[in-house]
Each structure stands twice: as C-alpha cells, then as structure tokens.
Image (cartoon, helix red, strand yellow):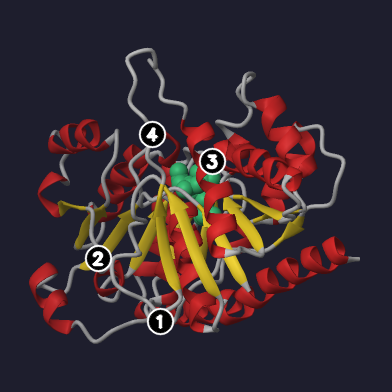
Amino acid sequence: MKIGIVCYPTFGGSGVMATELGKALATKGHEVHFISYNQPARLDFFTENVFYHEVSILKYPLFDYAPYETALAGKIVDITKVAGLDILHVHYAIPHASAALMAKSILAEEGIHIPVVTTLHGTDITLVGREATFKPVVSWSINHSDAVTAVSESLKKETLEHFNIKRNIDVIPNFIDFTRFNKQPKEHFKMVLSPNGEKILVHTSNFRKVKRVEDVISVFCMVSAQIPAKLLMIGDGPERTHIEMMSRGMECADKVTFLGKQEAVEEILSVCDLFILPSETESFGLAALEAMACEVPVISSNAGGLPEVNIHGETGYLSNVGDVADMAKNALAILKDENTLKRFKANSLQRARHFNLENIMEQYVAVYQNCLLAQNA
Ligand code: GMT
C-alpha cells in the first residue's frame, strides 16, 4: 500500500506513534509518505520506502495567523496525486482530520478517491477538542472519516460522551518497539547516577500542565525522606522552568537532576527502578509503556487510559489525581523490598508485551484494508 501519514513532528506522543508506525509499515514493504510542517523527531535518518513532505506556508502581511490547515490540505492533494497514495492516516484530529477531509473532497472532484483514517490520541478530545470553537469541526471530522481509531477504551468513551458521534470507533492501543525499548546492560550509567546504590526514580514528559510535574517532585521528596533515592527528570516544555525553580527550594533538591530532552530514553530507563506519571489526563500514557518495556514499574494517577496500561498491584499502582501521599506510599511499598521490586519489574515487562508493535501494526493494516474494500465495493 502507499500510505500518507499526517502528524505533528514534535516529541509529543501522537507524533512519536505516527512516526514509529510509518517506519514499521515501511519495513513490511509499504510505501509511507509523511506530511508535516517539520521533519518528525524520530525520522532523522534515511529509511527505505519512507518519504517526507514538508508543508510550507506562504508568509503574507495580511495573515496574523498563517492558514496551516489550508496549506496542509493543498499538500495532501498534491502528494496523493504525485505519489499515488492509496490511503491517508491522520494522527491527532486537530487540524489534521478536517484538512484531510477537505483534500479528499477536492480529489474526489477529480475522480481520485482516497479513504481517510483518523486516530484520536488524547488532548484532541479531552482538552483542546472540547473547546467550543473546535468542537463542531472535531465532531464533523470524526463522523466523516472513513475509519476512526482511539488509543484506549477510555478515550473512545470520552469521545462518545462529549461529541455528537454517529459512527463506530475502533480501539487500537499504542504500541512499543521491543527492538528499541528493552532493558539494556548500562551498569556504568548506574554507577555514575547512583554510586551508593540509591534507587533511581524517573519521569519523562513534555512538561505541560496536564502532566502535573510538580506532583512528581512532591512524591519523590516523600520517598527520598525514607530511602536513599535519586530522581531523573527527562523532557522539556512550558512548565520546566517553574518546576525547576520550585524543586530548588525543597529538601530533596540535590537528589533531583533535570536532563532535558533525550534521544536515547531507553538507555536511561534501563537503569531506573520506578517511573512516576501523575497526569491530570492521559488517554494512554505511552511514556509509562516505554518504561515498562524497560522493566520499570509505574506509579501513576488513575486518569483516562492509564488503568489500561498500568495494572494496579501488578505493574505498579494507581492513585487518584493529586494524591501524592498515596503515590509515595505505593512507591515505597515497591522500592523497600528487593523481591517485591523484582516482581513488579518482571510483571511490567510481561504487561508491555501485550502492546508489541508487530501485533498492533497488523490491526492498523486491517483497518486500511477494510477502508479500501469498502471504497471499491
Ligand atoms: O501527552 C501529550 O500532551 C502529547 C499527546 C499527543 O497527542 O502528542 O499525547 C497523547 O497521545 C499519546 C499517544 O497516543 C498518549 O500516549 C498520551 O496519553 C496522550 N496524552 C494525553 O492524553 C495528555
């Protein structure tokens, strides 16, 4: 198949999933064309069957706001014709789904028919999409796509609850590539990071408000008051400066290291003992899955799709959003006893295997094939 993938190029989960899916589809012989305004973060080397098309927008003094959606629709029309795309898969509804549907209508007038698959990732439904000006467009785009998938049962439920949806939504969870995410022998890292055998706690995110990064610091301070521990903060985003300032005034400050954005997260995860994800909303929690694949148990909130990934009492624990005392208590329950820690680590890997890339990719291929069959019927 020739597949057009529209996504955000940034480090956010939807862009990462879209890029990894596209790369995996290419290894199976599909031709994949990425369409975005920048080269996707994980598409930084040459791969056979993978093409990248940049959406550039004319700068004109009249435009206070550059019309990205129009430029994207135009680019999709062009690439569909030039590359002979069979199917379009857009990740994150806003504005990708409506742009793709506009392109589909334009192409249809020229006798070119292409199905649009929309994957809902999270904040396009739970936060941004609910904003009054976006909402009717998101509803319309979902109802008019040829297929719609959501990354968790929870996200599907939220979509049906909050939007006027008149169609079926398939749940296809996020996936993990075990060839990249696995526990690697990085003992030399561990020696540097915790020379006295301190337990290593870790958080990775885009440091947006929804991640409640301040809760990570609070939980860690309570844990490190009880056992020798270090905290690694990976990622960057709007809240980072504020959180860094806040943590400097706390007792555990000297045990917290902000590492910024990291490419080889799996290498760092390989030496960690516990992952903390206290998010306000989280449709799936890809970062938690990445940690689990590297045998790191998870202390998280019970928001959104997190209970579908992190199994309470098995791979970690779930707490109500903001209940940092409960999170710290649960963290200590895992970390204080070596046998318990070992069990949670093994369970985490076991659970992560449910989300193996190979299986999940097949589910997307089946959705594409169904759309093409329906179109040709
Ligand atoms: O977490 C973010 O803010 C980024 C966002 C995105 O769309 O890029 O992530 C969402 O999609 C990920 C991949 O499907 C999910 O694993 C995240 O849970 C989801 N984030 C939220 O729902 C907040």
Hey, what amino acid is under mark 1? Lys
Total tally of numbered discs in the picture: 4
The residue that mark 4 highlights is 57
Report the Cα–Cα distance between label 3 and label 2. 48 Å
Front disc: 4 or 2? 4
Report the Cα–Cα distance between label 2 and label 1. 14 Å
Kindly tell me whether residue 243 is visible in this rendering: yes
Dot 3, how many residues are within 10 Å of its Cα: few (below 14), some (14-19), or many (20+)?
some
Closer to the camera in the image, 353 or 49? 49
Q: Which disc number belongs to residue 200?
A: 2
Front disc: 3 or 2? 3
Report the Cα–Cα distance between label 1 and label 3. 53 Å
Disc 2 residue: CB within 8 Å of ligand 1:
no
**Quarter of the figure with the N terminus:** bottom right
The residue that mark 3 highlights is 74
Up the image or down, 264 lies above or below 15; here it is below
Q: Are marks 3 and 4 in contact (CB under 8 Å)?
A: no
Q: Which callout, 4 or 2, points at the residue further toward the start of the chain?
A: 4
Dot 1, how many residues are within 10 Å of its Cα: few (below 14), some (14-19), or many (20+)?
some
